[in-house]
Amino acid sequence: MTDKILPGGRVIKPLSTPQSKPQTHAPEKKGDSFQKVLEKKIKGKGVQFSKHAADRMMSRSIKLDNQEIQRLDDAVQKAAAKGAKESLVVMGDNAYVVSVKNNMVITALDGNSMRENVFTNIDSAIIMD
């Protein structure tokens, strides 16, 4: 394959097909951080967590099991079906600000962090049991 030169000196390079590498799953190590384990468990499956959200969850001792992550994902899907873009999801004593269009948890708050707070730039709220 050769480059094409157009009038005016612009060069067009032909597209090449990228070589795909087989995906391997690294085993969880005893020393993996909560953030790394969280990313491995949910990567490509439903709602994702930003680095900021994962950091907040670590610092506030917020832990989600698979069932809670599924409930959070279901809430985000319901918000998406209603046309929401940025949502506040309250689950128990914790709250999550979620970018619905990106399927991404932006930040996480525990009960103490939620009190007397103002939530801005959201267009919907989902209150769960």
Image (cartoon, rainbow, N blue to C red):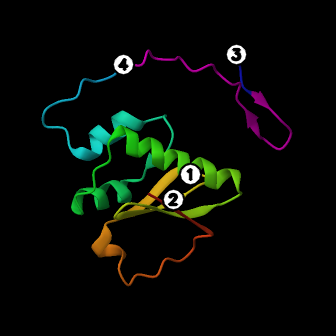
Mark 3 against mark 1, which lies toward the viewer? 1
Residue at position x 29%, y 57% in the image = 57
Please give left or right for residue 46 compared with residue 32 in the image.
right
Please give left or right for residue 63 compared with residue 96 in the image.
left
Mark 1 against mark 4, which lies toward the viewer? 1
- The residue pinned by badge 1 equals 76
Q: Compare marks 2 and 4 and give the one earlier in the sequence.
A: 4
Q: Are marks 3 and 1 in contact (CB under 8 Å)?
A: no
Q: Compare marks 1 and 4 and give the one earlier in the sequence.
A: 4
Q: Position of residue 28 (x, y in %)?
A: 22, 28
User: Element under label 3?
Assistant: loop
User: Element under label 2?
Assistant: strand
Mark 2 → mark 3, Cα distance in angstroms:
46 Å
Residue 24: numbered disc = 4
Q: Amino acid at mark 3?
A: Met
Mark 3 → mark 1, Cα distance in angstroms:
46 Å
Q: Are marks 1 and 4 in contact (CB under 8 Å)?
A: no
In the picture, residue 3 is in which quadrant?
A: top right
Q: Main secondary structure of the magenta part?
A: loop
In the picture, residue 29 is in which quadrant?
A: top left
Q: Compare marks 2 and 3 and give the one earlier in the sequence.
A: 3
- The residue pinned by badge 3 equals 1
10 Å crowding of disc 4: few (<14), some (14-19), many (20+):
few
Q: Amino acid at mark 4?
A: Thr
Q: Compare marks 1 and 2 and give the one earlier in the sequence.
A: 1
User: Element under label 1?
Assistant: helix
- Farthest residue, direction right: 7
13 in magenta: yes
20 in magenta: yes
- The residue pinned by badge 2 equals 98
10 Å crowding of disc 2: few (<14), some (14-19), many (20+):
many
